[in-house]
Structure formats: C-alpha cells, structure tokens
Amino acid sequence: MDTLAQFIQGTGFASMTWGNALMIVIGIVFVTLAITKDYEPLLLVPIGFGVIVGNIPMVKGMALGVYDAGSVLQYIYFGVSQGVFPPLIFLGIGAMTDFSTMLSNPKLVLLGAAAQVGIFLTLIGAMFLGFNPQEAGAIGIIGGADGPTAIFLSSKLAPHLLGSIAIAAYSYMALVPVIQPPIMKLLTSKEERRIHMKAPRQVTRREKVIFPVVAFLICALIAPGSMVLIGMLFFGNLLKESLVTDRLANTARNAMIDIVTILLGFSVGASTSADHFLTSQSMLIFGLGALSFCIATAGGIMFAKFMNLFLTDKINPLVGAAGVSAVPDSARVVHSVGIKEDPTNFLLMHAMAPNVAGVIGSAIGAGVLWTVLVK
C-alpha cells in the first residue's frame, strides 16, 4: 500500500495545478489552430505540443524539464537560450529568399524600415510601464513579427523573459491574417486599395550575386550587433544566387531549417511551464507585443501614404503593411486584401519587397538595440 501511495503521489495528476491545466489547454488550442485554420502550422504544432509537454508536472528529484540541470530538454533548449538556433533559421531564410522585387524597386525598402517604428515606440512604452531598458528592448522587437530575431535579442538582453517573448512573437506571426486586415482597411480608402503598381523590372544575375555581399557590409558596419543574423541571412542568399552551391542552398532551405524549426519550436513551447509563464509580467508582455505589431503595421501603411504625396507612380498603401518580417504571410495578406477590392490587382510580388526588407530591418533594429542597451 505504501508503494501504491508513493506511485499515486508521483503521478502528474497529483501535482497538477490550475496553471498547468490552463497552459495545456492553450497548447491544444495552438495545435488546433495550426491544423484546422492553417495558422503557421510549421511553428504552432511544435510550439503547441511543446507547451503541453512543458506543463506536465515534474517528479521531484528527476531532471525532466527545460529548467532542470542535465535534462535532455535543457540541452535542446540551449540552442534557444544561447541564441544558436536563430542564426541557423536566418541561414535557411536567406537560401529561400528572392530579393529581386526589392532590387527592382528600391524605394519600397523604406516601407520595411518604416514598419520598424513599432519596435522603438513599444520600447518607450515598456520603459514607462516599469521595465528596465534591456527588458524593454527585448519586448519591443516583438513588433518586427520576427520570431528568431526576438529570441536572439531577448537571449542577449533579457534571458529571464525569453519564453514569454518567444511565444508572443510566434503567436503574432501566426495571427497575421487576423490582426493585419482590420488595420489595413481602417487606414486606407477603397480607392487607395485599388491602386495598381507597375510590374517589377527584370533583375540581372550579377545584381543578385553582388547584393548579399554589399548589403551585408553596409548593414554590419551600421549595426555590428546585427552581424550574426544579417551575415547568416546574406550568406544563405549568396548560396542560392551564386548557382554553384545548389547542394548547400538546398540543405539550408530544406533539411536544416526544418530540423532547427522543430527543435526551436518544441523547446520554446516546453519552456512555458505555468510557474514560469503565468505571471502578470508575461501578460503585460503579450499586450505590449500586440501593440508593437499593430504600430508596425500602421507605420508601414502610413509611410506609404506619405510617400505618395511626392511620387508620380503611386504605391498601393496596403503594401506598407508587409513591412513587418512575417515572410511571406504578411505579403500574402496584402495580396488577399487587395484582390478582394479588385480581382485584377496582383500585389504579392510588390508586397514581397518591403516584406524581405522588413527581415533585414528587424535584424538591424535588434543589432542597434543590442549595441546600445548591452550592459
């Protein structure tokens, strides 16, 4: 009977708290949204299942969880906590990204830069609410809608907030089709949403090969703190555009990025145990992250409207919403909203220009914040 009592006491049922139960429900919701609504399934399925795993009550004396020294999950989480996984993700993104539309219409890069306003305004707001500058910088980067960048910066500036920031960043990336359309429709008129843009010009192979080298030098010299992320992004792109390293490019954009995404998503989810995650601070981070993302979306749209005051060939302001780093979902949402207004107006390729520029912009923003706020 003593053995039976000891077994029952050691089960997860005996140690389950309402917080664990709530987080398990949230994990199930993430998985459900990914499967039924197709909301970033490659991210939400690993994260959601990781949340479920991370909230099974641990047996005292057994190293099982992310925060238990020597556990398997802790070793996997090392890639998150030390910022190893994000640069590898950027390598794969670079090997998948075509910068042609951005190179064909360079002024659209400004929309990617304008969308980063959400990062810095949220930083100010977070400091006003009592977060220290390092915490505020890590929270503000959520507005870039770039999960790897958010993880990388928070691992350097505010590692104690890493789990909350990572979940917030990936949640808002997944909810781009829900969050952005209302903002886009609120800030634009029907006539503006129907603006047609000229087809992008053909970009030469030489331009594509030179761009990653020159762009890396410029970005890294402006913000040395962005060197790792930007370097891996443009290295991956060079592998793709050189046309002589197809095997390496295919590995980077397929097998490697898939493996890293699985490990990153699962371990981030497993880090959200209720005792670490369900705090008033985490809820505040989620609220500030949503605000940051909304401001970033609005910033890109409003800057496009500002540019139209001086341009002969007008920009469809919807394209400005793609200035956040959620590639390619944000560009797809822009195209979807535009085509509902005019079935002949294809905005996808135009929207990809500020979208990929936003990836670069958020990485540079992270580098600037790391340089300025590092202790």
Image (cartoon, helix red, strand yellow):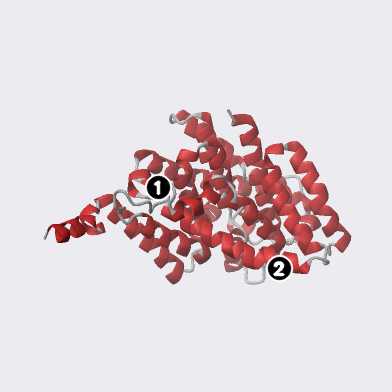
Which residue is located at x 58 percent, y 66 percent? 336
Viewer-side residue, 103 vs 195: 103
User: x, y (%) of residue 63?
Assistant: 38, 51
Sequence-first tag of 1 and 2: 1
Viewer-side residue, 361 vs 199: 361
Q: Nearer the viewer, mark 1 or mark 2?
A: 1
Which residue is located at x 80 percent, y 62 percent? 241
User: x, y (%) of residue 281?
Assistant: 39, 38
Residue 324 appears anywhere in the view: no
Which residue is located at x 36 percent, y 63 percent? 28
Q: How crowded is the residue under tag 2: few (<14 C-alpha within 10 Å), some, or many (20+)?
A: some
Which residue is located at x 32 percent, y 57 percent? 56
Residue receiving disc 1: 68
User: x, y (%) of residue 53?
Assistant: 38, 59
Residue 194 appears anywhere in the view: yes
Considering the image in quadrants, where does the C terminus appear?
top right
Using the rendered view, name the quadrant where residue 195 is placed.
Answer: bottom right
Q: How crowded is the residue under tag 1: few (<14 C-alpha within 10 Å), some, or many (20+)?
A: some
Residue receiving disc 2: 250
Mark 1 and mark 2: span between their CA atoms?
36 Å
Using the rendered view, name the quadrant where residue 141 is placed.
Answer: top right
From the viewer's perspective, is residue 351 above or below residue 37? above
Indicate left or right for 132 with 346 as reference. Answer: left
